[in-house]
Structures are given as structure tokens and as C-alpha cells.
Image (spheres, rainbow, N blue to C red):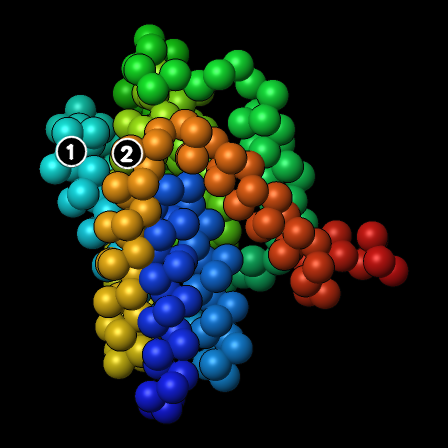
Amino acid sequence: MIPSPETIAFLMAAALMAGCIDAMAGGGGLIALPALLAAGIPPVPAVATNKLQSSLGTFGACIAYARAGHMDLKAYRWPLIAAFVGSAGGAWLLQRIDPSILAGLMPALLIALAAYFTFSPKISEMDRQQRVGIVALSLLIGAIGFYDGFFGPGAGAFYTTIFIALGGLGLVRATAQTKAANFASNLAGLLIMIAGGHVIWIVGLAMAVGSITGGQIGSRLAMRFGSRLIRPLLIIMSLALTAKMLLDPKNPIHALLFG
């Protein structure tokens, strides 16, 4: 299907906003995916097309962080490889079982993340001592990559939390490494979706223009304002994702809360 020019313009604007927020705190899918569904695109092609625009937007944000010296691909190559492999495994499993198995667990985990960033001591912009070795860090990042390929919402917040709490990175550097891990897991999921023939290329590439532009804006804002901007956004996006999941009638927790 090829949407009208007005619809494509709407989706590009949504992708710009999503890319900006995603580059700073993750959660851009909360904007981009509903916009695709609102445009009348069926769920599976919407997810696949969102992976395309998100992958390109995240790649652009990675370049911005790398040029500013906040990203160390050599030191963290194994976590990035783990994110890619984990996401490929999650996308493969997604085609075989119902992802609602995880949907009921995610609100509680996202609330816990929001509480962590709300009540934890002030997060430094400077790196601290790493609490786990690179193998353990890679396994944890790989697990989040698996989740990203299988289900997705909130993956960026989980990556950031691991890089800060266990990897010892300052907030801006953790956000930069999160974008690299996000790109790896998005790329793996995208390749699986391309193989399945689900991507709507004209829509995805048009949205990618907005996503790349938003990613450049968001990454520069994050590097300029640091934790003053990133920390509140992480809390807001975690709570917004939680609200979206709880209000979804397909989520098993929705029935418990609202009958």
C-alpha cells in the first residue's frame, strides 16, 4: 500500500519527534508505531516499517555521539554483538509464540525503572567503576536485545540502566552506548522483517528522513544538557510506556485492572 502525500507528511513529522525523543531517552516507538497504525497500516507491516525508520534514525544518532567522543565501539563490541544476536533470536521466536506472554510483565518492570531514575542518587556525568565484567555485561545486553527483537517497548531504558548501574558509565556515555546497542538490535530485527517481506519501503524511507533529523537534534540536546534533560525524559517515557500498555485491551493486566 502507498499512503497519500498528506499521510506520509504526517508520518515524517511523527518520526522526527520520535527520533528526537529516542536519541535522548528511548521510547520513540511510543510515537512512531501508533502513528503508523493510525495511518491504516496493518500491525506486522507497521512494526517492520518502524524498524526501518528507527534503524536509520538510530544510526544517525550513533554518528553524532561517536563524533563527539562519547562512544567506545572497541571496548563495548561484545555487548553490541550480543544485542544483535539476541535480537535476531527474539525476532525468530516472535514468529512462533505469542508476545503477550511478556506484555503482562512489562508495566511492573518499567515502573521499577522509573522509580530507579527518580529515587536513585544523582547520576554523574563521569564514568565510575564497572561492577560486572564484560562477559556478564554482554549477556545482560544480549538479553535486552532478545527482548527488543521479541517485543520491544522500553528496550532503550533497559539498555541505559544496565550501562549506568552495572557498566559504570556516566549518563551521556550510557545513552551513547545505548544508541549503539539499539542500532544493533534494530538492525537484526529489520533483517528478519525484510526476509519476511513485511517492510513498506516508501513509507519507511520517508519516515527515516524525519527520524534521522530528529535523532541529530535529540543527540545534540542530550550532549548539551546531560542528566538535566535525559533523566526526566527516561522517567516520563517509562511511565508513558507503562500507561500505554495498561490501557491496551490486549494486555493481560488490563483485564485485571479494568475488568
Q: Quadrant of residue 194?
A: bottom left
On screen, residue 145 versus residue 255, left or right, reads: left
The amino acid sitting under disc 2 is Met
Circles 2 and 1, Cβ within 8 Å, touching? The answer is yes
Res 94 visible: no
Q: Residue furthest top?
A: 129
List the residue tagged with mark 2.
Answer: 223
The secondary structure type at the circle numbered 2 is helix
Vertical relation: 209 (above or below) 1: above
Vertical relation: 235 (above or below) 84: above
Q: Quadrant of residue 32?
A: bottom left
Res 57 visible: yes
Residue drawn at x 40%, y 58% is 18
Q: Which mark is residue 68?
A: 1
In front here: 23 or 112? 23
Give the CA separation, mark 2 to mark 1.
Answer: 8 Å
- How far across and how far down the image is residue 50, in percent? 37, 66
Placement of the C terminus among the 4 image quadrants:
bottom right
Residue drawn at x 30%, y 61% is 211
Sequence-wise, the earlier of marks 2 and 1 is 1
Residue drawn at x 15%, y 33% is 68
On screen, residue 232 versus residue 255, left or right, reads: left
Residue drawn at x 28%, y 50% is 217
Crowd around label 2: few <14 · some 14–19 · many ≥20 (10 Å): many
The amino acid sitting under disc 1 is Ala
